[in-house]
Amino acid sequence: MNKREIKNNSKNVMVVCVACFSILILVMIFGFIIKESLPAISSEGFKLFSGMLWYPTHSEPEYGLAAMFIGSLLITLLTAVIVLPLGYIIAFFMYGYAMPWEKNIIKSSIDLLSGVPSVIIGSFLLVYVAPIFFKLGAWSRENILLGAVGLTILSLPYTASLMEEAMSSVDKSMKEGALALGATKFRAGFSVISKAAMPGLMNAVILTLNRIIGETMVVLMASGGAAIIPMSLWDPVRPLTAAIASEMGEVELGSIHYSALFAAGLVLLTISFILTLISKKISRRSSK
């Protein structure tokens, strides 16, 4: 065996070891969260996931996660309704219309925005955006709409970059062929390129949803804190991530409250895992 073969074999062994280590860490994380969740699941049963009341410190505590779970889904969907069209418009402009210098400016701005800490975004919302919402009729300083705006700011660079990469990966001959057949630049980009890039665009959507539902600081600061199902855009909401972040540091170790917070984390981890599997499946289909 020559030196090159030894070097290649060493690299292969290293890659396999790193991959196995990553899988082991993932299994350990799942196992740890499941282990810590079991006391609450055993004690509360299905009521833990179906109950609407979250009063863990009352004399007769309630550990219902349903209202917070629904709140997490609602703020995620509201953010998606805002950020996905905006991200597509930015990506479409960068791909089909922007001059090279314009594209560089937009990309630089996106990179700068993506580097802003989420706590700064939350502070900006509370100081400057919340008063505007009060003038528009909001009754709560923090509400689901304010949280969605913060999540939009946070996830927009990610969404726009992924969508632009998906469109740029399409063979340029498809666009040139559409233009040669008389299609307008908009028609070629919207009907031909976007359709060809659909697997990549759908992958961007799934990854964006995964990012939104796992965000903590912005929703903790801007979405309120009431574990209720919001009936309007001005109602506060308490997503699962906010509950975990705000209560985990003060909860009694080993208590049912402690275990219920891990059960909330298990719900989030399961959702993230499912979204990741969907993303991987879409990526495999697009590569065929």
Image (cartoon, rainbow, N blue to C red):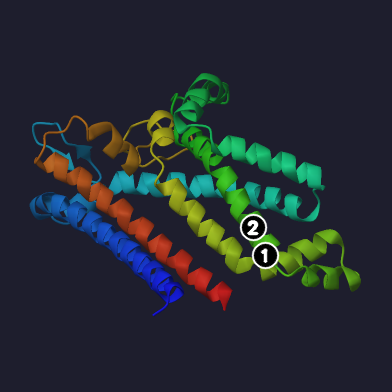
Which residue, given by chain and number where applicable, does mark 1 sit on?
169
Side (left or right) of 274 relative to 126: left
Side (left or right) of 136 relative to 219: right
> Which residue is at the front of the view, 248 or 66?
248
Which residue, given by chain and number where applicable, does mark 2 sit on?
165
Q: Amino acid at mark 2?
A: Glu
In terms of secondary structure, where does tag 2 sit?
A: helix
Q: Residue at x 31, y 65 (%)?
A: 17
- Please tell me how crowded label 2 is: few (under 14), some (14-19), or many (20+) other residues with Cα within 10 Å: some
Q: Quadrant of the N terminus?
A: bottom left
Please state the horizontal and vertical placement of residue 272, each as a whole percent of the image. Answer: 37, 56
Q: Quadrant of the C terminus?
A: bottom right
Please state the horizontal and vertical placement of residue 203, each as a whole percent of the image. Answer: 54, 62
> Which residue is at the front of the view, 255 or 53?
255
- Determine the residue located farthest toward the front in the rendered image: 2
Q: Residue at x 28, y 53 (%)?
A: 267
Side (left or right) of 181 relative to 278: right
